[in-house]
């Protein structure tokens, strides 16, 4: 029978593969990231000029996405990491700090890229879903991803507070919080990757 430890390691490999897919799309988007920002864009910075696919907005999204990918190495360390005894390889506090700081910084950059709060035009994601058009019709995925980034980031702060308060992490309310945090992160992965595929691989704009 497959043991829980093997399953945990396998889930870590799955997370690694999913992150690999994001890194692949980001690699495809690298030439656009390397384009120099025109001086005019730096002289007239507004909430609208630094969002979406604008020269600044793109760079913010790219760096934010890299930070979110790096923050997920915590999960990989937790699942694949070498551990002595115990089912859960709980990484040291410096790993959790790394996860929290990179997760929070990435979420902030992504929110600016989304136009939040001053130019968050597509906040009603359900109004921008056109399933009849196939994948590119799921344009509203970008604002769903923006909401999820906000919620996951905020939930992280709550989790950190529970983590510091709980003496028994496995048997406390922390356990339930962790399940929600992980489920929301999964939803963010799906919505965010859909947006990346549309915007970076298919170079489709929200103009439909
Ligand atoms: C979880 C991560 C991300 C979220 C939540 C997100 C969210 C959004 C939102 C809400 C918009 C619409 C902005 C507007 O015009 O009002 C947008 C546009 C755009 N994003 Fe992202 N983004 C993310 C990551 C990325 C990354 C990593 C890239 C590129 C490497 C990228 C490239 C673009 C481009 C090119 C547009 C303009 C295309 C369009 O108008 O549909 N995004 N994004
Ligand atoms: C959008 C950003 C974030 C994403 C996608 C994310 C995702 C995750 C995932 C997938 C895990 C589970 C690790 C595992 O069991 O494999 C986790 C754990 C955790 N995250 Fe986040 N997170 C984010 C931001 C944050 C922030 C900003 C904080 C704190 C301020 C935070 C605090 C925590 C804590 C306390 C844990 C549990 C650690 C443990 O079990 O020992 N997260 N996160």
Image (cartoon, grey):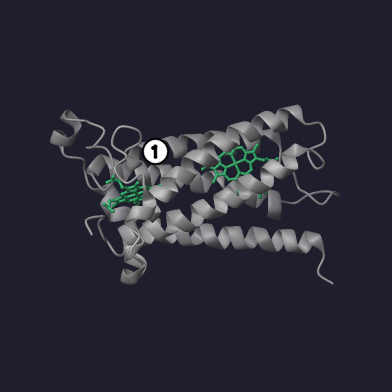
Residue 20 sits above or below residue 58 on the image: below
> With 170 as the anchor, is 148 left or right in this view?
left
Q: Which residue sits at x=75%, y=51%? A: 82
Q: Which residue sits at x=63%, y=62%? A: 13
Q: Quadrant of the C terminus?
A: bottom left
The answer to which image quadrant residue 46 occupies is: top left
> With 164 as the anchor, is 109 left or right in this view?
left
* Res. 98 in view: no
| Viewer-side residue, 111 vs 124 | 124
Mark 1 nearby-residue class (10 Å; few <14, some 14–19, many ≥20): many
> With 155 as the anchor, is 145 left or right in this view?
left
Residue 23 locus on image (x, y percent): 45, 57
Label tally: 1
| Viewer-side residue, 135 vs 82 | 135
| Viewer-side residue, 70 vs 199 | 199
The residue singled out by tag 1 in the image is 111
Q: Which residue sits at x=26%, y=61%? A: 204
Residue 139 locus on image (x, y percent): 33, 58
Q: Classify mark 1 as within 8 Å of ligand 1 or not, answering yes or no.
A: yes
Residue 52 sits above or below residue 24 on the image: above
> With 185 as the anchor, is 108 left or right in this view?
left
Residue 24 locus on image (x, y percent): 42, 61
Q: Residue furthest front?
A: 127
């Amino acid at each position: 029978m497959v043991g829980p430890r093997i399953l945990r390691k396998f889930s870590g490999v799955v997370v690694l593969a999913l992150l690999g897919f994001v890194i692949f799309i980001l690699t495809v988007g690298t030439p656009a990231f390397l384009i120099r920002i025109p001086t005019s864009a730096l002289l007239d910075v507004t909430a609208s000029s630094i969002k979406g696919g604008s020269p600044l907005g793109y760079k913010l999204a790219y760096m934010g996405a890299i930070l979110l990918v790096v923050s997920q190495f915590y999960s990989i360390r937790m699942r694949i990491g070498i551990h002595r005894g115990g089912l859960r390889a709980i990484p040291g506090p410096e790993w959790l700090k790394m996860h929290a700081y990179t997760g929070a910084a990435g979420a902030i950059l992504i929110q600016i890229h989304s136009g939040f709060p001053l130019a968050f035009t597509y906040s009603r994601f359900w109004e921008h879903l056109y399933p009849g058009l196939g994948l590119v019709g799921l344009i509203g995925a970008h604002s769903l991803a923006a909401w999820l980034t906000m919620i996951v980031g905020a939930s992280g702060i709550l989790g950190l507070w529970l983590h510091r308060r709980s003496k028994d992490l496995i048997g406390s309310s922390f356990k339930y919080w962790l399940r929600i945090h992980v489920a929301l992160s999964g939803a963010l992965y799906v919505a965010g990757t859909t947006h990346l595929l549309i915007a970076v691989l298919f170079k489709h704009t929200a103009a439909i």
